[in-house]
Each structure stands twice: as C-alpha cells, then as structure tokens.
Image (cartoon, grey):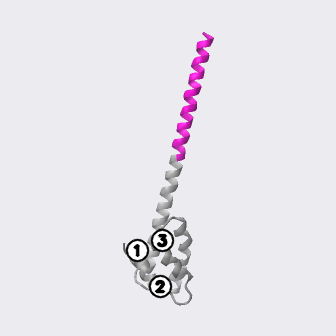
Amino acid sequence: MKLRLAAVSAASLVIALTGCGQVQDAANKAVSDGASQVATAAGSEVKKQACALVEDGLVSVKDKELLGGLVAGAETAGVPSDITTPLRQIAESGDQVPAESVTALKDACAA
C-alpha cells in the first residue's frame, strides 16, 4: 500500500511539474504578446501624431519641436523607417526644415 501511495505521489509530482512548465510557457507567451501589442499601439500613436503635424505640408517651430520629441519613441516602438527617417531629418534640421523630408513624411503617412 505504501509503495502504491508513493507511486501515485511521484506520478502526481511529475504531472504537476509538467503542468508548471506549460503554465510558465503560457505566461511567457502572454507577456510577450502583451508587450508586442503595446509596442504596436505605441507605434501607431506616434505615427498618428507625426502625420497630423505634417498633414498641411507646413512645419512650424512648435511642430518641429513636437516632431523632434517623437523621434526616439517612434524608433523604440518600431515605426517603419519611411516615417522615422524623415522625422529624424526634420528634428535634426536647423532653422530651415527640409521640404523633401516633410514631403517624404507626408507621403509615408498617406501610404
């Protein structure tokens, strides 16, 4: 009887440990999926903000400051380079915002 009880306990332990691994895998996948969804949402929001600022084709000094503040967030969120490259060019420009960068950003937003 003790041997049978020990065998059942051992089998229960193996099942529990196997289940823990599956639970851990499921938890890791949920965290990864959640992080991916957050990054996608953040990227979409950054793109939306950048596109709204250049929609009229004009970039004011305030717009330039706001666009400059979006560069790091856009790159971190994985926004495509067709958005981040002109965004960075605008942010790094001096007193004259490059018209071709504004046009490139507008075109990327329209795509």
- Give the magenta-colored segment's residue range: 1-28
Residue 14 picture location, percent across and down? 57, 27
Q: Tell me the kind of residue under disc 1.
A: Cys
Quadrant of the frame with the C terminus: bottom left
Residue 91 picture location, percent across and down? 54, 80
Q: Would residue 108 appear left or right of 35 to someone viewing this image?
A: left
The circle on residue 81 is 3
Residue at left offset 48%, top offset 69%: 46
Q: Is residue 66 visible?
A: no
User: Closer to us: mark 3 or mark 1?
Assistant: 3
Distance, label 2 to label 1, CA atoms, is 15 Å
Disc nearer the start of the sequence (2/3): 2
Q: Tell me the kind of residue under disc 2.
A: Val
The circle on residue 22 is none
Which residue carries the number 2 mark? 59
Task: Check residue 56 for magenta coloring.
Answer: no
Q: How dense is the environment of label 2, judged by Cα within 10 Å: few (below 14), some, or many (20 and up)?
A: some
Q: Tell me the kind of residue under disc 3.
A: Ser
Give SS at disc 3.
helix
Q: Main secondary structure of the magenta part?
A: helix
Vertical arrangement, residue 23 with respect to residue 110, above or below = above
Q: Quick check: marks 2 and 3 in contact, CB under 8 Å?
A: no
Which residue carries the number 1 mark? 109
Distance, label 2 to label 3, CA atoms, is 20 Å
Q: Residue furthest bottom?
A: 95
Disc nearer the start of the sequence (3/1): 3
